[in-house]
Amino acid sequence: MSATTISKPNFKWRVVDIAVASVIGVASALIYWLVSIVTAAPWSVLEAVVPGLAGLFNGLWLFAAPLAAVIVRKPGAAIYAEVVGGVLEALLGNQWGGLDTFSIALAQGVTAEIAFLIFAYRKWNIGTMLLSGALSGVGCWAYSFFTHLQAIDIAGSYGVVYLITTVVSGTLVAGLLMWFLYLGIAKTGALDKFASGREVRGLN
């Protein structure tokens, strides 16, 4: 699917926009919570092999923002969905606690949103999605590194490896995988109330 340029983006949120972004956030929260449980043991294994390698899992906590943004296509959609996912994950219970989970979700949502802001919410293609996933990875890494890993040299091997693995994971999972998930959902007709869905089905 090629890039789409919207001459006059509609920035007004509708009830359906809020509803779908909320559903994405809620569904993501459950997945994030499950991921935190399932990856606990493998995380330790990867860290023992190469410190920072476990960043490859981080993309599994980043996907709500790019997915909500590309579907809803309204400013703030990425931030909203990621924060909803983070807050609900914390309420379900995780090892990081409420404030920490909210804060990193906000950082990830804001950095994911930047990719769409750069193009003034006019370009919705795989390139923008990959950029959003990558930037979300940077947000995840930055928050984790500067709040919990201050004692580790930012230019040291751990900091560099953790940055690379987190950005790669964000790009592939939150960017590439979510792009194809969006296309798959849109082709079913489930997103026909959105320009993003009608566009895929050639209804615009």
Image (tube, rainbow, N blue to C red):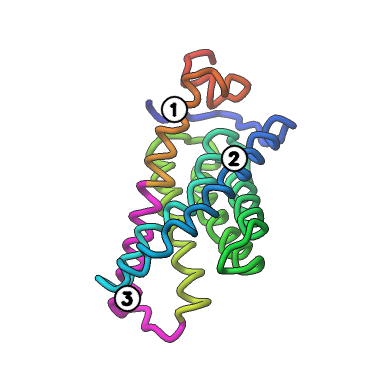
Q: Is residue 98 above or below residue 130?
A: below
- Which x, y percent locates residue 23? 64, 38
Task: State yes or no: residue 61 in magenta.
Answer: no
Per the model, the C-alpha gap separating discs 1 and 2 is: 15 Å
Residue extending farthest to the left is 49
Image point 40% across, 33% down: which residue? 180
Query: Where is the C terminus found, in terms of image quarters?
Result: top right
| Magenta span of residues | 150-172
Task: State yes or no: residue 155 in magenta.
Answer: yes
The residue that label 2 is drawn on is: 24
Per the model, the C-alpha gap separating discs 3 and 1 is: 36 Å
The kind of residue on which mark 1 rests is: Leu
| Circle 2 crowding by C-alpha within 10 Å: few under 14, some 14–19, many from 20 | many
The residue that label 1 is drawn on is: 183
The kind of residue on which mark 2 rests is: Ile
The residue that label 3 is drawn on is: 158
Q: Earlier in the sequence, mark 3 or mark 1?
A: 3
Query: Where is the N terminus found, in terms of image quarters?
Result: top left
Q: Quadrant of residue 57?
A: bottom left
Count of numbered badges drawn on the protein: 3
- Which x, y percent locates residue 86? 61, 56
Q: Earlier in the sequence, mark 1 or mark 2?
A: 2
Which residue is nearer to you in this view: 70 or 116? 70
The kind of residue on which mark 3 rests is: Tyr
Determine the secondary structure under disc 1: helix
Residue extending farthest to the bottom is 151
* Secondary structure character of the magenta stretch overall: helix
